[in-house]
Image: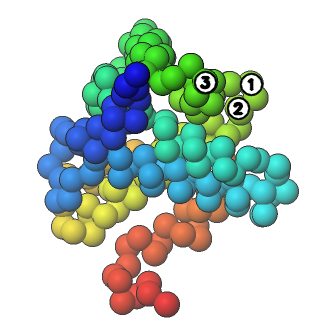
Amino acid sequence: MDHSFFAMISRLRWIDRWALMKNSSKENLSEHSLQVGMLSHALAIIGNKRLGKELNADKCALFGMYHDVSEILTGDMPTPVKYFNAEIANAYKDIEKDACERLLSLLPADLYESYSSLLMPDDKLYEYEKKLVKGADKLSAYIKCLEEKKSGNLEFASAESSTLETLHALNLDEVEIFLKEFIPAYSKTLDEIKP
């Protein structure tokens, strides 16, 4: 029997982000998901090494990689629309959950539980890890804004400042450490950052 879960997941690369804005460099959901996975992993490691936490960094990486897969079926809804009000935000969460369940139905039964725990992680069991993924998602957006600004595109100036405010409002020490120690390098040239 054919199972199309991974064929569907591979379609992340066809969904562009930032569709309402002029981009000097397009970014698709596949690229974004990998970056969020790496950033989530980094935030968890920072939490463990610097802050004495016991976070599952590997799970954070996987949660980050799969955090937007529902958008294969829903599309990338612009943030201002998605969070316009509580009613829309809650309805969209239900739509995302339904999309994840539809994607999971494309797996063989013996793999369902393993992927279900990645696409729809237990809120109580991984509450803090999910917060880190949210922080990583916002860091990814902030990095995109910095890169666009660096290439001379002022279209992202407002998004840059509002995303930075959102990052600080998350009140995550791991995010603050990343902002202080790692974000400055994103504004430098290759010659300035290479070893």
Residue under pointer 1: 124
Q: Residue at x 44, y 84 (%)?
A: 193
| Callouts 3 and 1 close, C-beta under 8 Å | no
Residue under pointer 3: 110
Q: Name the foreground residue: 19 vs 60.
A: 60
- Quadrant in which residue 162 is drawn: top left
Residue under pointer 2: 127
Depth-wise, is mark 3 or mark 2 nearer the camera? 3
Task: Name the kind of residue labelled 3 in the image.
Answer: Asp
Q: Residue at x 70, y 60 (%)?
A: 46
Q: Position of residue 58 (x, y in %)?
A: 66, 50
Task: Name the kind of residue labelled 2 in the image.
Answer: Glu
Task: Name the kind of residue labelled 1 in the image.
Answer: Lys
Q: Earlier in the sequence, mark 3 or mark 2?
A: 3
Q: Left or right: 23 with respect to 60?
A: left
- Quadrant in which residue 82 is drawn: top left
Q: Position of residue 25 (x, y in %)?
A: 20, 59
Q: Earlier in the sequence, mark 3 or mark 1?
A: 3
Report, in whole angstroms, how far the alpha carbon at label 2 lies from the one at label 1: 5 Å
Report, in whole angstroms, how far the alpha carbon at label 3 lies from the one at label 1: 24 Å
- Quadrant in which residue 7 is drawn: top left
Q: Position of residue 132 (x, y in %)?
A: 62, 44
Report, in whole angstroms, how far the alpha carbon at label 3 lies from the one at label 2: 26 Å
| Callouts 2 and 1 close, C-beta under 8 Å | yes
Q: How is the image coloured?
A: rainbow
Q: Is residue 88 above or below residue 54?
A: above
Q: Which mark is residue 45?
A: none
Residue 86 visible at all = no
Q: Left or right: 183 with respect to 188?
A: right
